Image (spheres, rainbow, N blue to C red):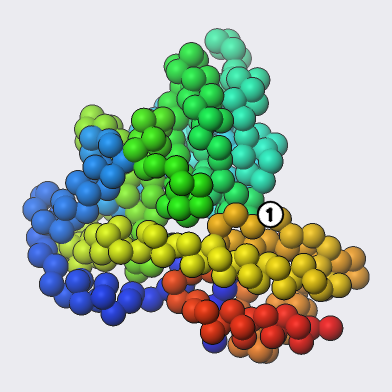
């Protein structure tokens, strides 16, 4: 079965498993797990930031960041398709007691002018705007990437309005590889960054939250409250170390595979439109009268799994378990759909 439902379905590579078996471990709640400490130091250094915190999931790292940056009754600015709003179980309200101001961005990306227009005035009738959350790459935007100049403008807007700036960088390394941007430039622009290890980087679990020392000290306490304090987590952290050292540049393969399948899809009459393919995600819309669920079922019958994201849209996500031979099989299956 070729699984294109998400890049979370990958299994550890042989090299990752071997590295994992050699991991030194200790009690991370006591700060004594050497592999966790190494992973956190490595991630912080990569982004030129002071400190980092290993979390079980990307949702947890985002929710910790939001809670640490806000107070109950505050307002968080994000895109209407943002993962922190769409796919984190209402966590902004449940965990932080905050509300959201949703922006109508372009494939999940908004600009500084939109942020400025959405900041509430200093008025007792209004929620206090305190945080801007950006997602790069944008999942619902088909893996779209931000231009660094626009992020710089948004940061300037945040600074002039005394707002915090958080990046949901679940697939940030996909963006860095696709655009040639540097991790350190992101560390200079955001107050906090979360990066998933269990998506394109292929780890079994894990996410890193990065910020300054004072913020991460606060975040560590929130992680404990959320039930995210781990003990001998070094085996999982070792996977993260291996991924950061070995699995970043290979993301180009996933991007190329997505472009190859996208090119084949564009030749088919049952396709109405395809979002621009920049990284490892394809989102395409089927033609009027075509049943998206039937297309997914037909592909499943040919041992290819993918998902509908709306009644008319289908998503495919490419990852390290998808090899060159699989692309030929996928394209043949697409050709077989009438």
Say which residue appears at 59% left-offset and 79% top-offset.
327
Provide the residue designation for mark 1. Answer: 276
Q: Is 197 in front, or is 259?
A: 259
The residue sitting at the front extreme is 180
Q: Position of residue 212 (x, y in %)?
A: 26, 32
Q: Is 145 in front, or is 178?
A: 178
Q: Position of residue 15 (x, y in %)?
A: 26, 75
Give SS at disc 1: loop
**Horizontal arrangement in the rendering, residue 18 relative to residue 194 (left or right):** left
Say which residue appears at 11% left-offset and 63% top-offset.
25
Say which residue appears at 86% left-offset and 66% top-offset.
287
Q: Position of residue 17 (x, y in %)?
A: 25, 76
**Horizontal arrangement in the rendering, residue 24 relative to residue 275 (left or right):** left
Seen in the picture, residue 24 relative to 78 is either above or below; the reply is below
Say which residue appears at 63% left-offset and 44% top-offset.
108
**Horizontal arrangement in the rendering, residue 234 relative to residue 150 (left or right):** left
Q: Is residue 112 visible?
A: yes
The residue sitting at the right extreme is 289
């Amino acid at each position: 079965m070729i699984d294109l439902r998400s890049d979370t379905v990958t299994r550890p590579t042989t090299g990752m498993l071997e590295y994992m078996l050699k991991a030194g471990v200790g009690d991370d709640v006591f700060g004594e797990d050497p592999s966790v400490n190494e992973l956190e130091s490595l991630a912080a250094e990569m982004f030129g930031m002071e400190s980092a915190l290993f979390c079980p999931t990307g949702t947890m790292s985002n929710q910790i960041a939001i809670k640490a940056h806000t107070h109950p009754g505050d307002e968080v600015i994000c895109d209407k398709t943002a993962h922190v709003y769409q796919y984190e179980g209402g966590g902004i309200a449940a965990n932080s007691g905050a509300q959201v101001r949703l922006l109508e961005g372009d494939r999940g990306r908004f600009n500084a002018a939109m942020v400025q227009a959405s900041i509430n005035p200093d008025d007792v009738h209004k929620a206090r705007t305190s945080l801007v959350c950006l997602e790069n790459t944008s999942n619902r935007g088909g893996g779209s990437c931000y231009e660094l100049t626009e992020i710089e403008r948004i940061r300037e807007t945040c600074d002039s309005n005394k707002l915090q700036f958080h990046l949901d960088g679940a697939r940030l390394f996909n963006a860095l590889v696709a655009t040639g941007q540097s991790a350190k430039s992101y560390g200079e622009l955001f107050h906090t960054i979360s990066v998933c290890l269990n998506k394109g980087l292929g780890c079994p679990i894990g996410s890193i939250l990065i910020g300054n020392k004072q913020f991460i000290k606060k975040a560590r306490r929130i992680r404990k409250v959320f039930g995210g304090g781990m003990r001998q987590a070094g085996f999982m952290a070792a996977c993260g170390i291996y991924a950061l050292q070995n699995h970043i540049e290979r993301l180009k393969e996933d991007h190329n595979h997505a472009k190859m399948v996208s090119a084949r899809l564009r030749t088919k009459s049952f396709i109405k439109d395809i979002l621009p393919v920049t990284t490892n995600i394809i989102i395409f819309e089927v033609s009027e009268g075509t049943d998206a669920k039937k297309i997914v079922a037909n592909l499943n019958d040919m041992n290819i799994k993918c998902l509908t994201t709306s009644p008319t849209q289908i998503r495919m996500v490419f990852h390290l378990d998808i090899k060159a031979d699989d692309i030929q099989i996928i394209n043949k299956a697409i050709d077989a759909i009438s």
